[in-house]
Structures are given as structure tokens and as C-alpha cells.
Image (cartoon, helix red, strand yellow):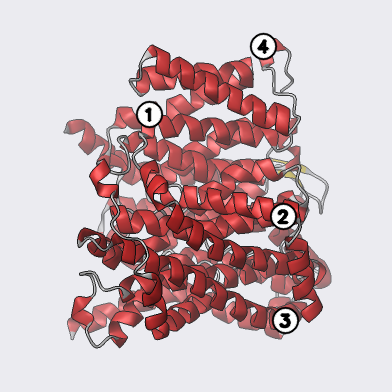
């Protein structure tokens, strides 16, 4: 096991990998600091540009991005009360009041050190869990993998609390899109409408660039203005005093990191739940809960530690089962596929060096981002003053030209534009995008596993009831589908009482 | 005000109705394929249609609709009417125009034209600033894709680029 860790580090310590890691980290900080863009958009825009890179270099770049985004998100959350990405919203609760009290530097320092320490604790936890996960995945054959894909979709749908039905609809629509193209079981071309471009199906990366980067770009166009109201909003006082606060409140850091690690490993739940759960637990554990929301430094430390700790553990469901922990991981799946690394049980066995390298890249990036983020806090906060009308053309051009560059097919541009509009409509009409992404990623594999299962059992569906892991997955599926109804029933009972 | 109300009503119905139409069209197409090739798509198609019909029922606001919302979609937000309809259409059209220009006249002509037009007429920048930004954007695209990644930029359908 130790040699894998060492190999991962050695591979990462090459000049080219370090260069791309640093580049990714800087881009992560940049995108993280701009509310509305975040890690998913950064990865979506950058994925096509990694096409010519070695897979390991591409992983170093993406690890850099994912590690840098949380720090960038904290900067805008604390200074502007506008979280760069959804998980940083919990940091706003106490971070911005601290900034208003003239303690922005303290809040940023605490966020930076909590980010770094949380990232390290998250990495240690993941390194401990990975060997067990690698053994566990060997229990999965085609029937289990099919049910797992269905379970993944349902988990992500129910995780978008209060939108289960809509999550399931977009998931199913994603599956319908995934069926387009050559069916590798029967050899039939399906739903291509005569287009030769669609013979290979709807290309994943152009679709993801559209769903995230372009959709956010249209959203920014519609909202208009700039992200920060005026330059006064981004002024900074002192920057260093908060660094030590994290170590003074080590229990908060540890709690947040553990919450982040556990939540990150649950597919579809994502960083927002981790950061808010960590925040709420810290409030509950505090002797002075009244001070939260008014500028308590622990209210910054708790969510920040959780956000970075979850990044490492969310790699487990993403890599082992192809079920992403959140939007960022969903786009990251696209990057893996582009580089010929098919997420799934075999990945934990066949690509261990790449996985360990990625984990180290993620850790190095979040430590580096914490320091660089503190140095660049002033120029980064200025980004939020850029007019949306300048930002939108830049994003649109990079997204469309980037999607063409993936394999130099002009059809990619059309797919990206169509998914951009679709993604925008999904934002506007409040339909979750994540389930569609999960379906696009898992659709082909799910159908293949379904066919293989039917061949194994001569078309007998009861095979799903005869295998222990399948039975367990079916029970979990039923429980998840019933959960929203049970929740509503319970709350109505409580209300009646 | 009336437009906003119309948008609000449209927002309630349109997505679920679109999902129903897509699922129905998909099922119609799926039944043309051999049994083995359509087995899984047909199952998913019917599930999609069922779920979309539930969503459509929810949009009616009837007792049944309110029940579905309470059980399955309690926290959905209707924000479609929050922004001007014409601004939203413009946002989509600007993107569609850029995509169409890239396809028709190629990257090296589409990028400067779009950036210039977007900054001049949408962003309200001066002619000089818009021209400068267009030049910088084109140079950036050329340097990144043509020089660094050594890709021959797409020439456009009208100038001999293949589709």
C-alpha cells in the first residue's frame, strides 16, 4: 500500500505535473471567487484543453482546480456575502458579519488555515478508506452495477431535497439522451435522426460544458450588473490574525473535517450539506450559540474545514461507482472518460497510482491555495467588480471554442449550445441539473449491465432478488423512494400534535 | 405586469408539458427498433412519461396537484417570471448567434465579431474598447488553440469547413 502512496507522490513531483497543479490551483481560486461560476464551470471549461495532456497531468490540473475553488469561494463569501460556490454559503453566515466589523482579515486567515487543515484530515481519512473500498467493489457484478446506477440516480434525486420528482424527471431525460447512438449490445443505431455525428451518442464533455459553464453564462447575462455592488464592498483590513484561530479551535476543525469526510463519501449529497451540517453541529456544541450569525470565528472555521475535507472522500463514490458527490465531481467524471479512465469498480484496482496521485494533488492544491489565496485576496476580490457583460462573452467564447477543440468536431459546438440553453432553462424553472449529468454518465453502462444481467438469468428478473447485494440495494432503493413521503407524513403528524 | 403573470403561468406548465412531449416522441421512435434494442429505452420512456404526467398534474394546482407537490416537490421555486422575458430570450439568442457564426463562418471570424458586437451593443462600451477587446480575444484564441495546442481552427461551413 505504501508504495502506491509513494508512487503517487513521485508522479506528482515532476516539473510538468507541478506546473499544471499550480495552474489549476490558480484557476480554481479565480473561478471560486466569482459567484455563479465555481468548480463545475472551471472544470467544464478546462476539460477540453486537457485533451492533449497525459492523463496524470490532466488529473494534476483538475486536482489543482478542485483544491483551489473552496478558498476562492471563501473570499467572496466573507467579503461580499456572495458565496463563490454553494458550499461556501455557510461561511457567509459569520464570515461576512466579521468583515462588516472590520475583521475581514481575521476571517480570511481562519478560512485559509481551516481549508488547509480540513484538506489534510480529509486526505488521511480517504487514504484509510480506499483499500477497504477497493475490496468491497469486487462484490459487484452486472446485476449489482445496474441497480447501483439506478440507486445513484435516486440518491441524487432525493438529495436535492424537496425536488425529488423533478430530479427523477431530469434523470430520466438524461437517460433518454444517453440512449442516443450506437447500441453496443444489439449493434443498432438509435435516435440519431440521420446525423452521423450522433452515431457515437451525445458527447459527454460538450454537454457538460453547456449544462454548467454556458448555462451560468446565460444566467449572468440575464441578471446583468456586476457581482459586487461597489469597490467599498471589497476593501480588506488585516489579513493574518485569523490563522491561529483555527488551531485554537481544533475541536471545531476536527468535527468539521469528519463531517465533511462522511458526507463527501455519500453520493449526491455534496458540499453544501457538509458545510451547513458542520456549522449547525458547531452551533449546537457551542456554549455561546447566540453569538453565531453575528461574527463568531468558529462559524467560519467549521464550514471551511468540512468543505475541503469532503473533496477527498467524494472521490470514492465518483471513482468506484461513477456516482458523483456533486456537480464538480460530475464534470470531473467527464474529464476521466475523456482520458480513457472509465469510472467504476475496476478503476480502484487498475488505476491506483493515478488515484493516489489525484488525492495528493488535491491535498497539495488546498494547502497551496490557502497561502496563495491570502496573498491574492485583494486582486481576486476585484474580479467580482467585472461587469457581467464583459464576463459573459469571454465565458461563451471559451466554452464553445473549447468544446470544438475536444476532437475538432463542429457538432460539439451545437451540442454545447443546446445544452447551455437547456441548462439555463433548468436553472430558471428549478429543475436539478445534477441528476441529468449522472444519467448521462451512467446511462450507457446501466443499459449494458441490464442486458448482461438478462443474459445471465435468461430474462428472469427475479435474479435481482436472489443475490444478497442486489437485495440490499433494492431495499435501499425502496427506502430512498419512500423517504420524502415518510418525512412529509412525520412532519404533518408533528404539526397536528 | 400582465406579461409577468403570463410568464408565471407558462412557467408552471411548460417544463412538464415539454417532458411529456419528449417522452411520447421518444417512445414512438423507440417502438421502431428491434425488441432487444428497445427494451431498456422503452421502460425508461414510460417511467419518464409517468413522472412528467405527475409533474403536469402538480402544475394544475388542483387538490391532486397540491398533494403531489407536498409529497414529492415541496421546495420548488418558480423563478421564471423573476426576470424580463425579453432579456432571457436575448441571453439565449446571443449564445445561439455565436454558435451559428462559429459553424457558418468559422472561429477566427466569429470570435472578433461576437466579442465586438456584444461589448459595443450589449455592454455599451466605446468603439475603441470593443475593437480592442475583440482583437485581444481573437489573439488569445489563436495563441491558445492554434499555437499552443497546434490545432487548425475551424474555417466555417461557408468557407469549406466540413460539418
Dot 4 or dot 1, earlier in sequence:
1
Spatial distance from mark 2 to mark 4, Cα to Cα? 41 Å
Dot 3 or dot 2, earlier in sequence:
2
- Left or right position of A25 against A393: right
Q: Which mark is residue B89?
A: 1
Label 4 lies in what chain?
B
Contact? badges 4 and 1 (CB < 8 Å): no
Contact? badges 2 and 4 (CB < 8 Å): no
Considering the numbered disc 4 on the image, is that residue within a helix, a strand or a loop?
A: helix
Considering the numbered disc 3 on the image, is that residue within a helix, a strand or a loop?
A: helix
Label 3 lies in what chain?
A
- Name the residue beneath numbered marker 4: B158
Q: Which of A238 and B88 is in front in this view?
A: A238
Q: Residue A131 carries which label?
A: 3
Q: Can residue B15 be seen in this view?
A: yes
Crowd rating for badge 2 (residues with CA inside 10 Å; few <14, some 14–19, many 20+): many
Amino acid at each position: 500500500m505504501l508504495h502506491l502512496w509513494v508512487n503517487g507522490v513521485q508522479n506528482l513531483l515532476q516539473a510538468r505535473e507541478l506546473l499544471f497543479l499550480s495552474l489549476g490551483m490558480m484557476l480554481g481560486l479565480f473561478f471560486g471567487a466569482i459567484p455563479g461560476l465555481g468548480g463545475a464551470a472551471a472544470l467544464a471549461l478546462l476539460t477540453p484543453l486537457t485533451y492533449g495532456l497525459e492523463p496524470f497531468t490532466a488529473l494534476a490540473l483538475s486536482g489543482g482546480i478542485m483544491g483551489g475553488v473552496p478558498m476562492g469561494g471563501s473570499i467572496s463569501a466573507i467579503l461580499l456575502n456572495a458565496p463563490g460556490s454553494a458550499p461556501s454559503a455557510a461561511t457567509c453566515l459569520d464570515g461576512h458579519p466579521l468583515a462588516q466589523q472590520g475583521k475581514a482579515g481575521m476571517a480570511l486567515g481562519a478560512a485559509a488555515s481551516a481549508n488547509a487543515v480540513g484538506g489534510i484530515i480529509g486526505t488521511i481519512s480517504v487514504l484509510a478508506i480506499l483499500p477497504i473500498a477497493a475490496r468491497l467493489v469486487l462484490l459487484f457484478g452486472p446485476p449489482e452495477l445496474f441497480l447501483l446506477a439506478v440507486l445513484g440516480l435516486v440518491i441524487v434525486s432525493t438529495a436535492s431535497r424537496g425536488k425529488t420528482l423533478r430530479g427523477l424527471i431530469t434523470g430520466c431525460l438524461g437517460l433518454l439522451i444517453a440512449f442516443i447512438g450506437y447500441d453496443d449490445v444489439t449493434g443498432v443505431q438509435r435516435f440519431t435522426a440521420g446525423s452521423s455525428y450522433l452515431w457515437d451518442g451525445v458527447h459527454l464533455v460538450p454537454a457538460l460544458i453547456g449544462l454548467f459553464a454556458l448555462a451560468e453564462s446565460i444566467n449572468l447575462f440575464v441578471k446583468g450588473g456586476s457581482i459586487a455592488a461597489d469597490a467599498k464592498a471589497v476593501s480588506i483590513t488585516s489579513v493574518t490574525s485569523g490563522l491561529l484561530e483555527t488551531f485554537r479551535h481544533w475541536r471545531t476543525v476536527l468535527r468539521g473535517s469528519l463531517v465533511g469526510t462522511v458526507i463527501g463519501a455519500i453520493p449526491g449529497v455534496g458540499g453544501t450539506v457538509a458545510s451547513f451540517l458542520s456549522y449547525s453541529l458547531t452551533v449546537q456544541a457551542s456554549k455561546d450559540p447566540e453569538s453565531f450569525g453575528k461574527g463568531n470565528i468558529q462559524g467560519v472555521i467549521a464550514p471551511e474545514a468540512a468543505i475541503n475535507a469532503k473533496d477527498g472522500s467524494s472521490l470514492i463514490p465518483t471513482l468506484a461507482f461513477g456516482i458523483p458527490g456533486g456537480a464538480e465531481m460530475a464534470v470531473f467524471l467527464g474529464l476521466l472518460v475523456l482520458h480513457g479512465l472509465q469510472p467504476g469498480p475496476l478503476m480502484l484496482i487498475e488505476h491506483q497510482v493515478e488515484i493516489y496521485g489525484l488525492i495528493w494533488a488535491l491535498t497539495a492544491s488546498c494547502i497551496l491555495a490557502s497561502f496563495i489565496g491570502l496573498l491574492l485576496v485583494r486582486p481576486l476580490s476585484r474580479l467580482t467588480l467585472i461587469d457581467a457583460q464583459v464576463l459573459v462573452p469571454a465565458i461563451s467564447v471559451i466554452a464553445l471554442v473549447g468544446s470544438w477543440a475536444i476532437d475538432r468536431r463542429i457538432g460539439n459546438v451545437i451540442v454545447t449550445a443546446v445544452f447551455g440553453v437547456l441548462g439555463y432553462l433548468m436553472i430558471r424553472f428549478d429543475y436539478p441539473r445534477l441528476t441529468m449529468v449522472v444519467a448521462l454518465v451512467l446511462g450507457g453502462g446501466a443499459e449494458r449491465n441490464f442486458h448482461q444481467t438478462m443474459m445471465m438469468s435468461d430474462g428472469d428478473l427475479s435474479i435481482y432478488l436472489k443475490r444478497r447485494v442486489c437485495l440490499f440495494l433494492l431495499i435501499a432503493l425502496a427506502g430512498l423512494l419512500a423517504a420524502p413521503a415518510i418525512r412529509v407524513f412525520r412532519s404533518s403528524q408533528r404539526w397536528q400534535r | 405586469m400582465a406579461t409577468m403573470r403570463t410568464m408565471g403561468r407558462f412557467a408552471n406548465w411548460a417544463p412538464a408539458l415539454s417532458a411529456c412531449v419528449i417522452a411520447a416522441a421518444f417512445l414512438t421512435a423507440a417502438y421502431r427498433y428491434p425488441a432487444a434494442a428497445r427494451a431498456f429505452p422503452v421502460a425508461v420512456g414510460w417511467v419518464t412519461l409517468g413522472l412528467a404526467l405527475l409533474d403536469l398534474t402538480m402544475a394544475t394546482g388542483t387538490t391532486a396537484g397540491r398533494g403531489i407537490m407536498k409529497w414529492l416537490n415541496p421546495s420548488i421555486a418558480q423563478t421564471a417570471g423573476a426576470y424580463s422575458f425579453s432579456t432571457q430570450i436575448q441571453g439565449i439568442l446571443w449564445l445561439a448567434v455565436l454558435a451559428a457564426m462559429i459553424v457558418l463562418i468559422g472561429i477566427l471570424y466569429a470570435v472578433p465579431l461576437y466579442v465586438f458586437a456584444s461589448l459595443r451593443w450589449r455592454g455599451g462600451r466605446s468603439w475603441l474598447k470593443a475593437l480592442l477587446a475583440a482583437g485581444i480575444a481573437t489573439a488569445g484564441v489563436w495563441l491558445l488553440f492554434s499555437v499552443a495546442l497546434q490545432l487548425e481552427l475551424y474555417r466555417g461551413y461557408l468557407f469549406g469547413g466540413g460539418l
